[in-house]
Image (cartoon, helix red, strand yellow):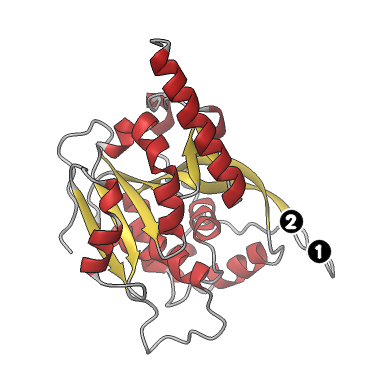
Amino acid sequence: MNQIIDTHNQHQCTLVLGVDERTVRQLEGVWPTWRLYLQQWLSWPVLFICDAKAGGADYWNRRLAFTKPLGEWALALWDWPTLDIDAEGMTQRERMLTAFVRVPPAVIETRYWLKLDTDVVATAQFARCLPGWFQDRPALVASAWHYTKPATWPALLDDWADTVPALNHPGMRRMDLPPVEPGQETIRNKRIASWCCYVLTAFSKIAADCAPDRLPIPSQDTYHHYIAYRRGDPIQKVAFKNMGLACITSDRRRKRLVDEVLLAADVGKELGQ
């Protein structure tokens, strides 16, 4: 696939969407709200990371026809794991989340890329990004989150990172959270949720270079946050939920919200608002 090089948008950003047979149905459901309220993001280059197990380029071009017209866009077929990788216990979720670690830094040359989940409903016109968000060139710009599940993941990442030379330079640090008690499912720590997340492309290349064949834990945002924390890279927390975006995991609740958003938009047009 050709590299995506942005030459026209002021934020130098690519929108990245991951789709398989399940999430493409989510995307199709929320897309009308994105058309209404996320015009700025949809004007950027768009990279679709597509599950190659579901079909090839022809299949995905047909399946994503509802997103057109777009400006600059590209498909990346995700055909992982390869036969030389131990895939025991691997879930579809792990497959697709791993793609967000591997694919964007390999093909994107814009300064940032924006991961936006397919279960996000746009409920109002998204305000423009504030310049202060990017002032310190943060590795990640995302909503705050306050715990990790399973609770053992931070310790697993600490022990794994201790074996990676690139993550053991002076000034780099372990998390060293309190020991996990038997039966403990979550552990509190200040981190991010990546349902809407700007990622510094240069940082994502470092994170990808550090990653083994399978990520130490099957979670892209937990992994990216840990690498940024370990290295001391800036992380900018933004309350995207207060900016006209709603991440809804329930299919029924999401459809109801989409219907409400579209109905309100139609009423507004009739009233000349």
- As drawn, the residue found furthest toward the top would be 272
In the rendered view of the protein, which quadrant contains the N terminus?
Answer: bottom left
- Counting every numbered tag in the picture gives 2
Residue 177: x percent and y percent?
71, 57
Q: Is residue 243 above or below residue 233?
A: above
Q: Which element type, helix, strand or loop, lies under badge 1?
A: loop
Q: Residue at x 37, y 53 (%)?
A: 17
Q: Residue at x 36, y 76 (%)?
A: 53
Query: Which amino acid is tagged 2?
Result: Ile
Residue placed furthest toward the right = 182
Q: Residue at x 52, y 60 (%)?
A: 223
Of residues 266 and 179, the one nearer the viewer is 266
Q: Residues within 10 Å of mark 2 (few under 14, many from 20)?
A: many
Question: Is 180 left, or right, of 263 in this rendering?
Answer: right
Q: Position of residue 29 (x, y in %)?
A: 44, 47
Q: Is residue 19 left or right of residue 72?
A: right
Classify residue 205 by image quadrant: bottom left
| Residue at the extreme bottom | 84
Crowd around label 1: few <14 · some 14–19 · many ≥20 (10 Å): few
Q: Is residue 56 visible in this depiction of the protein?
A: yes
Q: Are marks 2 and 1 in contact (CB under 8 Å)?
A: yes
- In this figure, which residue is indicated by the disc labeled 2? 187
Q: Which residue is mark 1?
A: 184
SS for callout 2: strand
What amino acid is labelled 1 in the image?
A: Gln
Q: Residue at x 47, y 76 (%)?
A: 214
How far from the left and from the top, in percent, is residue 101? 40, 62
User: 256 or 198, which lies in front?
Assistant: 256
Q: How many angstroms separate mark 2 from mark 1 (CA)?
A: 8 Å
